[in-house]
Image: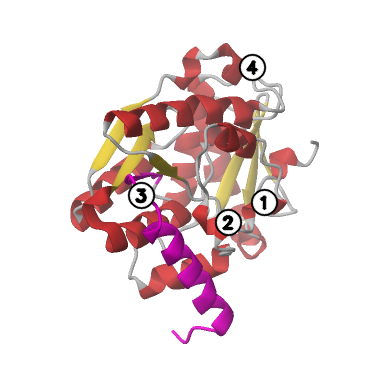
Amino acid sequence: MTLTQTLTEKIQTLENCVRSTVGGIAVAFSYGVDSTFLLKFAHDILGDEVVAVTVRSPFVPSEEIDGSINFCKKEGIKQIIIDADILSSEDVCSNPPDRCYICKKYIFSQITSAAELAGIINVYEGTNADDINDYRPGMKALDELCVQSPLIYAELTKAEIRALSEELNLPTSSKPSFACLATRIAVGEQITKEKLQMVEKAESFLHKNGFYQVRVRVHGNIARIETEKPDILRLASLADETSAYLKDLGFKFVSLDLSGYKTGSMNLPL
């Protein structure tokens, strides 16, 4: 990979940020593209001064947690796993427009507490420069808790992070983008464990059938499937099997969104 001057400067900015951080770093680690790159990059520089903190909750598929554990074991990175009872918060479950803020405040309060117990002062998270263009009320919570977003500071984009991840031979370099399962449920609609499990199983079914960048959005008893436009016709050819499986999970109606996959599509009304 030939680095442009701009990308070289961005990497240097990120390295300077990591090296100047005193008191250890806890990286909020979800095993997504961004947090995996950030964790690996920081750990390569500071070694055992960097730990991963992973939150296990109904909002995160179990395969993501398993992936995070395997990655940390392979890389020799200490990992702290927090079990978060996020569904105990009615403010979260009622799913208001600022649910992401409430949820981030809840989750990152636990992450910062876990970091403090481990004697670590700083908390990093993996929001990248592209993400600031989306509706993200959770960023306010990060600011309030003094959580740092070094990928934004270094102005690294998703495409750049993927390219750098490939250079580092990270297993996440081409991994589809992922957002917590709560983002699949329409604003104002109650979030329940049952709905989250329905979404997780539905998306797992689609992944196993070769649809990787896919979302199953929940609108009452309707499942609205988003996949990338080149995959729409192929998914339509599996309409009978897909509809039958999702209806067995509990959906009454199953639809295919002809507009294709769009990150943050549930935020469009906001």
Q: What range is drawn magenta here?
A: 1-30
Mark 2 and mark 4 lie on one chain; the one further toward the N terminus is 4
Depth check, front residue: 173 or 42: 42
Q: Please say if 164 is above or below 236.
A: below
Which mark is on residue 22?
3
What is the quadrant of residue 157 in the picture?
A: bottom right
Name the residue that disc number 1 marks: 132
- Secondary structure of the residue carrying tag 2 is helix
Mark 3 and mark 1 lie on one chain; the one further toward the N terminus is 3
| Foreground tag (2 vs 1) | 2
Name which residue type carries label 1. Ile
Mark 4 and mark 1 lie on one chain; the one further toward the N terminus is 4
Name which residue type carries label 4. Ser
Q: Residues within 10 Å of mark 3 (few under 14, many from 20)?
A: few
What is the quadrant of residue 201 in the picture?
A: top left
Whole-number angstrom distance, CA of label 2 to CA of label 4 = 30 Å
Location of the C terminus by quadrant is: top right
Name the residue that disc number 4 marks: 94
Which mark is on residue 152?
2
